[in-house]
Amino acid sequence: MDEGKTRGYADALTIDENIGRGKLRVIETTRAENTEMLIKTLNLLGGEADTVRLFKQGSYGAIASDDSRFIDLIESLEIPYMTPSTLLIYLWKIRAISKQEARQCLDKIKALISSDEYLASIDELVKE
């Protein structure tokens, strides 16, 4: 995240704000030898490397990302993943957020996701 903030990435700045507000918490990653070899082989850096480290620590069921290149990579490694819009639909289905909240969040990220993904998510909300 620090690298993203330095480069001025909006998502890194938002994450930093949410950490400050207590909406997100920082978890340190451990550096297991086999995971570090994988990261080096795949030439992963920064947040992507930390994401793989955290997932490989074993207490998460999937990785959430909107980076299509990273999604292709983790998919090839058979690591489960979900996109932000898929995560919003999931949160709505398990009743962690309301349909209205899911729709508002989808509208906020509309410019950042593909129109197909946005429309599919809206269709999911409408059909139930």
Image (spheres, helix red, strand yellow):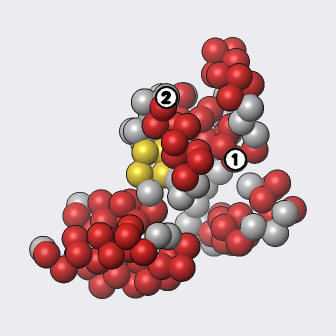
Q: From the image, which quarter does the N terminus lie in?
A: bottom right
Residue 32 drawn above or below residue 91: above
Residue at 69% x, 47% y is 47
Quarter of the picture holding the C terminus? bottom left
**Numbered label attached to residue 47:** 1
Which of the two discs, 1 and 2, labels the residue nearer the N terminus?
1
Is 124 positioned to the left or the right of 110 in the image? Answer: left
Q: Are marks 1 and 2 in contact (CB under 8 Å)?
A: no
Give the side of residue 44 with respect to residue 118, left or right.
right
Question: Which residue occupies the foreground of this view, 46 or 69?
Answer: 69
Q: Which mark is residue 33?
A: none
Q: Count residues near mark 1 (Cα–Cα under 10 Å), then give few for <14, some for 14-19, many for 20+.
A: some
Local secondary structure at mark 1: helix
- Identify the secondary structure beneath mark 2: loop
Q: Position of residue 70 (x, y in %)?
A: 58, 45
Separation of residues labelled 1 and 2 (CA atoms): 17 Å
Residue at which label 2 appears: 77
Q: Residues within 10 Å of mark 2 (few under 14, many from 20)?
A: few
Instruction: Decide: is 98 above or below 94.
Output: below
Which residue is depicted at the point 13% across and 75% down? 127
Q: Foreground: 31 or 63?
A: 63
